[in-house]
Amino acid sequence: MKILIIEDEQKVSSFLRKGFEEELFTVDTAHDGEEGLFLALTEEYDAIVLDLMLPKKSGLQVLAELRKEKSTPVLILTAKGQLEDKVEGLNAGADDYLTKPFALAECIARVRSLVRRSQMDKPTNTLTAGDLVLDLIQHTVRRRDVTIDLTAKEFKLLEYLLRNKNAVLTRSAIIEHIWDITFDSETNVLDVYMTRLRKKVDEGFDPKLIHTVRGVGYVLREPVE
Ligand code: CA
């Protein structure tokens, strides 16, 4: 995995570089916004760690210009308590943020999860389970010859289940992935959506694909012939 660290504070930058390299990442560093943006646009990175307060070009400017061309996952670093920066950063297209000071392990874990997420989002044409076919290009779902109409959220939910076929997904993992919120809020929402999705995908069809794993979450199983 190759990442770019855009950070003007030498100490923070080399601390990050060392940490990521120990985890076998390939690391490029840039020490101002201009250099950072140039590298981000000309090289291919799996993720970018971006400080907001930078010389020459601010982190937000870098992000805005990067997003016109590329969707490389970006983790922004914000100074403690600057909530507005954080919000602005996320609005400008950052994928996650971390408040300084932070633990190295946390930073690495966040970057890993961003990379994983973006790889999952890369388009392959279709996802299937038994006679269920989800077409990512056409944005359609069919079971046997029947077209199933799903809302955008239901589609995303089914896509997530299909990408993790046969793996039990915890409620919190599903909620975080689909709604980007933490576990303790709106837990009802998942049940409501799951009930609707199962009705559309499984009602009137055999075998059933989506199963509840009591006390844990849900799994979409490839039917055994
Ligand atoms: Ca800085």
Image: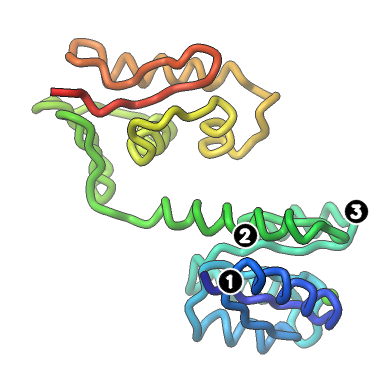
Look at the image and tell me in which quarter the C terminus lies: top left
What residue would you read off at disc 1? 25
Q: Nearer the viewer, mark 1 or mark 3?
A: 1
What residue would you read off at disc 3? 81
* Residue 61 point in image, percent of width and height: 69, 75
Q: Nearer the viewer, mark 2 or mark 3?
A: 2
Using the image, determine if residue 212 lies above or below residue 49. Answer: above
Using the image, determine if residue 171 lies above or below residue 30. Answer: above
Q: Distance of mark 1 from mark 2, alpha carbons?
A: 11 Å
Residue occupying image coordinates x 34% and y 17%: 198
- Please state which amino acid type lies under the numbered disc 1: Phe
Residue occupying image coordinates x 62% and y 76%: 4
* Residue situated in front as seen by the camera: 98 or 64: 98
In the rendered structure, which disc, 2 or 3, sits on the residue that comes first in sequence? 3
What residue would you read off at disc 2? 111
**Could you tell whether 63 is left or right of 105 in the image?**
left
- Please state which amino acid type lies under the numbered disc 2: Val
Q: Distance of mark 1 from mark 3, alpha carbons?
A: 29 Å
* Residue 206 point in image, percent of width and height: 17, 14
Query: What secondary structure is found at the residue carrying circle 3?
Result: loop
Query: What secondary structure is found at the residue carrying circle 1?
Result: loop
- Please state which amino acid type lies under the numbered disc 3: Gly
Residue 131 placement: quadrant: top left
State yes or no: discs 2 and 3 in contact (Cβ < 8 Å).
no
